[in-house]
Amino acid sequence: MVFGQLSYDMAHLLGGGVLLLSFLLLYQRRIAAVITAFAAQGAVLALAVAWQAHAQGAPALYLTALLAGAAKAVLIPLALRRMVARLGLRREVDAPLGIGGSLIAGLALVTLAVTVVPPGAGPVAAAAREDLALALSVVLLGLLMMVTRRNAISVVIGLLSLENGLVLAAAGVRGMPLVVELSSAALVLVLAAVAGFFVLRLRDDLPGGHPPLDLSLLHRFRGERE
Amino acid sequence: MNAVSSIPIWAAHLWLVALLPLAGAALLALLPAQRLAARLNLALAAAQLGLILALAARGRGPEAALLHLDALNLPLLLLAGVIGVTTALYSAATIRGEGFGPRAGRAYHAAFQVFLGANALALLAEDLGVMWVAVEAATVATVLMVALHRTPASIEAAWKFLVLCGTGIALALFGTIALALAAQPLGEGGATALSFGVLRQMAPEADPRLLSLAFVFLLVGYGTKAGLAPLHSWLPDAHAEGPMAISAVLSGLLLNTALHAILRARAVVSGNPEVLPPGALMLAMGLASVLLAAFALWRRRDARRLFAWSSIEHMGLASMAFGLGGPAALAGMLHLLGHSLVKSAVFFGLGRAIQIKGSQRIAAIGGLAESHPLLGWSLALAILAAAGLPPFVLFASEVLLMQQMVTRLPWLALPLGLGLLLAALALLKVLQALCFGPGRAGVPPPDQRHWLGHPAAEWATLLPLHLHLLLALLLGLALPAAGLALLTEAAGIAG
């Protein structure tokens, strides 16, 4: 595959779309908009995987595309939206780094991703390397979202978006074995995270729960201050 | 020997070790009677140990598709079988102290077996993809077990565990994919592209920068699961808030399995001389964990969290030993085995002490040797072993590691020695406080008094504890020649 060929251009267009939506996720100030951006990312991801299935002639990837589309573009966003409405969560994103700050950090991470996945000569096809660089950028931006946002729901969406990057990476490797199994197992993991978030919020609604739940939980060790 | 016809039986035997517990989990999930479930749980763990012993007795057979048995995973698998049985025994005797309802009890036993099965699968996997799926399943099962008490503290601990380990294994998956990409142009792809054997053959010709990238992600990802700094902070809470028996299997099995995954990845990438030195990365992460834990150990007031921090220290030591490689890798193998045995022994004794005293604060447990002499002295022995005192195996492995460090990287011997000394002293201080400090009358919760005095509960705590200590003693003093040969071969694969 070289530049100018349809399969190459389409793969890049769709992969780039996923990355662009990662930036959009970082840019949003309202939780509802974050969920919408995430749903859009899921839809573009499903298209990207389906295109790879077509380009590589790997029908198993269609299944991955279908699963990704159904879960990430439709079901998970619907569930998150209902949770936000029912549990009356805060509607603003709490970003200590500021929106501009996280966008700059995001740009730095994309530069890093492009640097560590060397383009150019080598036994691995250029297209596959560029796909990996795109996917690595999505993974790193997901991580960035997890560490720079305080709301638990942003942490969950960061993890979900990170996992989108993984699916994109797996689909881009021609002849990757077990790709359906791996992507389904990763989906189970993020579903567990969504379920965990739900349990956590329900607990907060019980009398005696902590009011605002945030990432500082991850830094605190309980049971040490009696 | 007609090897050809024995391959399917051999493969079935390997798969059965992993799949029997999973089938048992399905049964346990449907079984409402908790006492029966606890016994069935024990029987399933014993059956798995029997299968593993039969595997060991058969010797190493041909490679089955996706699974294999070699010198590196055989000792870890045997250890997993033994700790599975002793923990199931301990759990059967003390499950009533956890106060689970019928639903939580069913979930607990099913998750326990899912964990044992997934853990065995992760150890046996000959394929990076299968290994990742197994580690992921083991993670989800343990997160469920940590959350079972449904107290705010346990749900927070489970959330932290899920988010940090979920991120960790997501990074490991990225490493796996990058490794597949590095190997892709050299092989024909297909089902075997992630097999360790195939990847090891590819590594010398693969792109070193892609291999380095893959290894860094695999190290940080699986390192999170192994409790290595900087993503270790899930570990103390997960150990402290789940059911007592879970602390034993977390420290005994899960951490080893994660480190084993790193060792497999390292064996692949170190075939290429131009790759970032994997040993140096493991040394750095190991040393950071050892020093961090050695200082953190002094500030703990919660007994279970304290011993969880001690696990971080020991995993750091094992990572340093494997990172140093060569003869030090033998110290790493001994350390992994010894730490699992000793640490789960500590958690058995400590779990019982906590149930008797009704609190897991160190200050509330004091004076155990006076009020409960047998338990107190047994726990004291286990803590001495965990502190790395002779004659137990951790002493042998730490001396071997130190000696290798002094001769090969003398400038690292000083921080390592400092970490070892600080950690050992911290454990001795806690030993003094827990077992010989001023005695306090224990106040067990009222609903537990009737069974705590039951001889079976005492017996089921002390038997596993002493069995583990005996094994740790044997490993340290009287390792049979066949065992030493096996561990040396394992060290050759790992380091």
Image (tube, grey):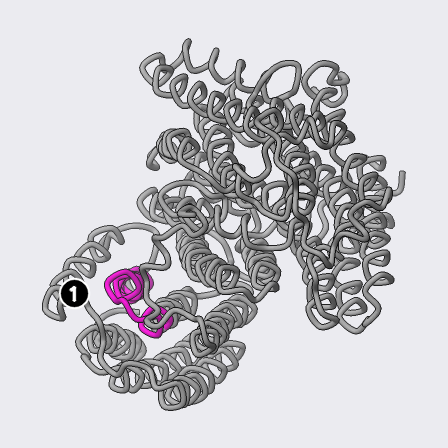
Tell whether A191 sits left or right of A32.
right
Q: Residue at x 49, y 60 (%)?
A: B153
Task: Indicate yes or no whether the magenta region holds residue B428.
Answer: no
- Can residue B428 be seen here? yes
Residue B10 at x, y = what percent?
A: 81, 48
Q: In which chain is the residue bearing label 1?
A: A
Task: Indicate yes or no whether the magenta region holds residue A135.
Answer: yes
Q: Which residue was labeled with disc 1?
A: A102
Q: Secondary structure at mark 1?
A: helix
Q: Residue at x 65, y 47 (%)?
A: B443
The span shown in magenta is: A128-156
Residue A88 at x, y = what percent?
A: 34, 86
Tell whether B302 sits left or right of A103.
right
Image quadrant in which the N terminus of chain A is located: bottom left
Instruction: Looking at the picture, tell me which residue is in the foreground, B338 or B174.
Output: B338
Tell whether B19 sits left or right of A137.
right
Q: Residue at x 46, y 39 (%)?
A: B301
Residue B401 at x, y = what percent?
A: 50, 18
Check disc 1 and give the amino acid type.
Ser
The residue sitting at the right extreme is: B1
Instruction: Looking at the picture, tell me which residue is in the foreground, B169 or B471.
Output: B471
